[in-house]
Amino acid sequence: MKILKKMMPFLGILLAGTVLSTCGSLPKVIKEPVLSLHSAELTNIDFTGIDLLCKVAVQNPNRIEVPFPKIDWDLFIAEGEFIKGSIQSGDPIKANKSVIVDVSVHVDYLNLYQTIVAMKEASKSGSDEMDYKVALAATFDLPILGQTTIPFEIDGKMPILRMLKFSEPSIAIDTIDFTGVTLLCSINVENPNKFAIPLPKMDYSYSVNKNAFLSSTMTDSGPLPAKETKKIEIKIPIKYAALYAAIASLAALGEADGDLAVTSKSEVPAFAEEEPESLAGTNKLPLLKAPSISFNTIALKSTPQELATGLLNKNAVVKYDVSFTIENKNVFALNLNALTCNLTVNGNSWGNAAAPKTVIGPGKTVTIPLSSSFNATTALQDAVNLASKKGSFTYACTGNATLAGDLPGLKAINIPLNLGGKL
């Protein structure tokens, strides 16, 4: 016991030295965790925004588990700070193990364009991408070392939302007849983005000779696929009766100047404050007018002697010509493809007649002859009397005139004939 008491001071000094030696080596034993990029990808992208998912690998190189760090992150776009966030909790990281930490970032295009001026300028300049950076700071509460912050950065490219591109409208005649015309207006819309985007609403108005005539709105609910161009067609029906009622001076004209104005308002929230896209197109509006068709006269080709002999023998063939006058009131030529006439005189049939094809020039009046014959004895006396100019005669002509022209959209038009009167 006396010996042990004498050794106690020396044992205390030895124990103190051992403790001091161990504590001095502890900082070298605890190592800082290591951060590395596992992956970074755009998980979703549309015209409203982008979802970015960064997967960060956190490695614990120590023989003991360490608490999950607090991870603060900042997203920079075009070197401007846009949004920040943090990850507060997670399971402890086991000794000599790694975990994957998901850093999810949502970028709203509307907020982005309102915050980062460079983004809007890049969109208008035609750029497809812009640089982004995610700056992370992982703060660990480590044994001995205490709070330790480890910085880490992720760089990449982010698609830029770009406005649709429009071509000036082209205006063509879709269909036309004597009652009105339907115009077909075509506008090409290009989506330069890497994702689908909704087609815009289009307001349009059409003026004739500087007089406002009609206006309407066209909507297309379907999206425009990525990197595609779509032709948008607007049909504008114009009834001549309504047009002349609204603008009386047009009734005397053969054509007029048409002006189409189209404004397109984007349905994309990020572009809601942008000025509407304004487009304009012009055309010559044909004011198609039905030709005037009138019956002229009947000219007998059989001589009075032939008619008298035929009447006596009851076997005469009566030959005759009839003629029509057609006035083309249009500024373009009309093609008379067919004209048929079923003629009756004093109620007796004189048979059918047909005219040859004829071109009627713009603003021209032509006489169209038709030749025919009949051998009905019931009508023979009328022919004899007509040749000798005896008695009174009424005629009726029913049939059909078929007209066409070189005007685009003008198909063959049938005009029924129902003419009658006294000779």
Image (cartoon, rainbow, N blue to C red):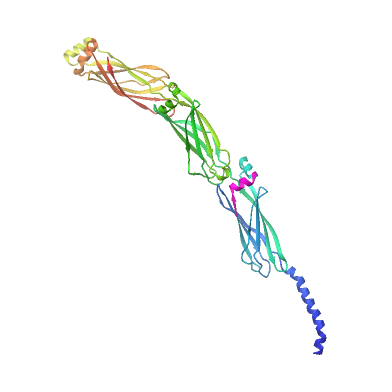
User: What is the x, y in percent for residue 341?
Assistant: 29, 21
Does the magenta portion include 113? Answer: yes
Q: Is residue 400 above or below residue 159?
A: above
Image label count: 0
Does the magenta portion include 17? Answer: no
Q: Is residue 194 above or below residue 90?
A: above
Towards the viewer: 301 or 42: 42
Figure quadrant of residue 383? top left
Locate the C terminus by quadrant.
top left
Towards the viewer: 375 or 39: 39
User: What is the x, y in percent for residue 227?
Assistant: 55, 43
Give the prevailing secondary structure in the magenta stretch: helix
In the displayed structure, does residue 175 sit left or right of residue 164? left
Magenta-highlighted residues? 105-117
Towards the viewer: 369 or 241: 241
Locate the N terminus by quadrant.
bottom right
Q: In this orientation, does residue 410 appear?
A: no
Q: Is residue 267 above or below residue 422?
A: below
> Which residue is found at the position 68% from the left and 68% from the top?
62
Figure quadrant of residue 412? top left
User: What is the x, y in percent for residue 137?
Assistant: 68, 58
Q: In this orientation, does residue 59 appear?
A: yes
In the displayed structure, does residue 252 sit left or right of residue 309? right
User: What is the x, y in percent for residue 345?
Assistant: 24, 18
In the displayed structure, does residue 249 sit left or right of residue 44? left
> Which residue is found at the position 78% from the left and 76% from the top?
18
